[in-house]
Image (spheres, grey):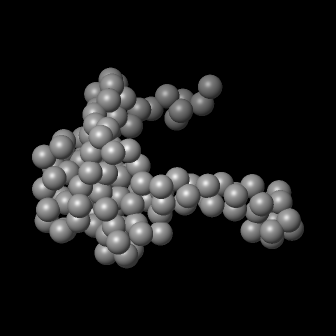
Amino acid sequence: MHVGLLRRRKGKAGTLRTASSADLDHLKDFLRTRPGVEAFLEPRTTVTDTTVVLVAATGEWTRRRVDGPDGAASFAKRHAIPLYDVGQIGYPQRMREWNARRKDVDEIGPSGRGGQPS
């Protein structure tokens, strides 16, 4: 086994990574470059800290860590976007449709003939 594969990312094993400035910068950039963005709060799990999913009007989406539910609420308020709790309302249909379209493109391939491009 290659020794480089054994190195861990920052932080201790078993410790959840919290939100970073890079996470917030990514969310801000997504907001700035897409219309009709709404935020969806995902609760902390044993594997991942609290996250927020931003979903654009097109259904395109991104997910990043935030500093808990209060951090998500503060982000949404600061950027004047609605924040919904995924546990209460689920994900929007447009997000599922976006995922389905992306899957179709991946299966068909850029040439439109399926498989890898020629």
62 to the left or right of 103: left
Vertical order, 103 against 112 (above or below) = above
60 to the left or right of 117: left
For image coordinates 31% across by 62% down, the residue present is: 38
Q: Can residue 101 be seen in this view?
A: yes
Q: In which quarter of the image is the C terminus?
A: bottom right
For image coordinates 31% across by 75% down, the residue present is: 32
Rendering coords of residue 114 (x, y %): 83, 60
Vertical order, 3 against 82 (above or below) = above
Q: Quadrant of residue 110?
A: bottom right
Q: Which of 88 and 69 is in front in this view?
A: 88
Q: Is residue 51 visible?
A: no
Rendering coords of residue 71 (x, y %): 16, 49
Q: In which quarter of the image is residue 112?
A: bottom right
Vertical order, 62 against 44 (above or below) = below
For image coordinates 33% across by 67% down, the residue present is: 37
For image coordinates 62% across by 25% down, the residue present is: 1
Q: Quadrant of residue 116?
A: bottom right
Rendering coords of residue 31 (x, y %): 32, 69
The count of marks equals 0
